[in-house]
Amino acid sequence: MIKQLTCIECPVGCSLAADIENCRVVKVSGNKCPRGEAYAVSEIENPVRVLTSAVLSRGLDLKMVPARTDKPIPKAKLYEAMEALKKICVTQPLAAGDVIVPDFLGIGVDLIATREAGQVKI
Amino acid sequence: MIERDLVIVGAGPAGMAAALSAYEHGVRDILLLERDQYLGGILNQCVHTGFGLDYFKEVLTGPEYAGRFIKKIRAVKDIELSLRSFVVSLTKDKVLTYLKPGGLVQIKAGALIMATGAREKTREMIPIAGTRPAGIFSAGLAQKLINIEGLLPGREVVIVGSGDIGLIMARRFTLEGAKVKGVVEIQKETRGLTRNVVQCVEDFDIPFYLKHKITRIYGRDRVEKVGVAQVDENFNEIAGSRFDITCDTVLISVGLIPENELLEMAGVELDKKTNVPIAKEVNKTSIDGVFVCGNACKIYDLADSVTRDSELAGRMAAEYIKKQ
């Protein structure tokens, strides 16, 4: 079976054709770079996305601290991740890249800050 | 009056790249003015990924992309930063007046780079009939409310136009628990990047109405519903195709327009339709020594392209200063 996909790895957005046999991708065509092939395989066999959002803070100079998962997570976990994310409140200053929640959702990814947040300046 | 070799207005991706590039090309007296209290401009509210693949060869979010430049800017002591500084006037002799905490400052610039970015087009710029209730936002404003202020401006959303910010907001609202009931685009193709249609609209099974337009916004105090109709090649409504979508919020995402009122004030020639400065070369204006870069110069799809464009503007300004 051939499945048509649009690659989302970069702004070019190649049209991909994934040849699927028994739920496995055996051949990818239409990609202009190797990322396209990896994307097609992942999209068919285990679709994943990096979750980006923002978490609440108290006592910091940003009301919301933008955050993301450091690795892609299964697409099916996005809503569960958002629910967990809404319960978080950051109170300590952070630098971009600092871990907010290690082993987020227990699936081996960290939730990291993407912007520095400092103490409120008085 | 105080004179500065180079003044840059705006410290988003364009202004920061221009400042760093001008420094690398030998300018040692740079004043960077920013009206916000932070560097980074609109990147700070773009918490999604999709930045940096071209420039840094890695996938970054907006704040991370901005952070790389903020770090560099802070390390260069010859770039003086002035935050919460709002330029209120500009003359053809490159005299700037700006407000900052503590007062009004007037300076003369040897060379000037305008990196003032763009504004979103509003409801008033596309013809939509109906009332003027609460609940109509430009997509970028909704983005700021959610990502910076932590407020969710609506529960049931219809997005007008398929610009990238609108597509990104379709996903953002959905993840925040709101229901996005449709993206309505009058053209036959998306205005945004195809990958944003895939990862922001199709991923969440959001109805995408191509060749459709909003005929009317209904609601007295708050938006109650919108009328939608299919259009033909000339964008005229196809009879009998009209239907309503109930919603409490309408997002407008129909493109950006360069924010060049200061250049206009200084007498720079602007294209009346696009608001882009008219000049013989890219990044130049009709006034010698006044340069423009980033979205103020041309609306870019990618921040990475803004950075590259602005680096050229920084170099051009440095060469101009050397010749004086």
Image: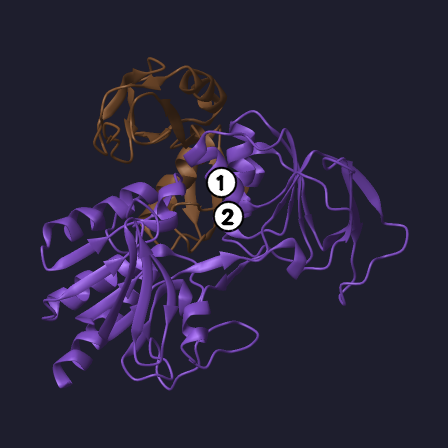
Chain colours: A brown, B purple
Image-based side of B322 in relation to B227, left or right: left
Name which residue type carries label 2.
Ile
Q: Are marks 2 and 1 in contact (CB under 8 Å)?
A: yes
Task: Kindly identify which numbered label has been placed on residue B165.
Answer: 2
Q: Residue at x 17, y 46 (%)?
A: B71
Looking at the image, residue A90 sits to the left or right of residue B190; the answer is left
User: x%, y% of residue B177?
Assistant: 56, 24
- Residue, x 29% and y 70% (percent of image)? B113
Image quadrant assignment for residue B183: top right
> In this orientation, which residue lies closer to the viewer: A37 or B236?
B236
Mark toward the start of the polypeptide (2 vs 1): 1
Residue B251 in the image: state x and y as whole percent. Answer: 61, 44
Q: Output the chain of dot 2.
A: B
* Secondary element at image label 1: helix
Labels 2 and 1 in the same subunit: yes
Q: Which mark is residue A104?
A: none
Q: Amino acid at mark 1?
A: Gln
Residue depth check, mark 2 versus mark 1: number of the one nearer the observer: 1
Q: Nearer the viewer, residue B98 or A108?
A: B98
Label 1 belongs to which residue? B143
Q: What chain does badge 1 belong to? A: B
For the point 32% across and 48% down, the residue is: A34
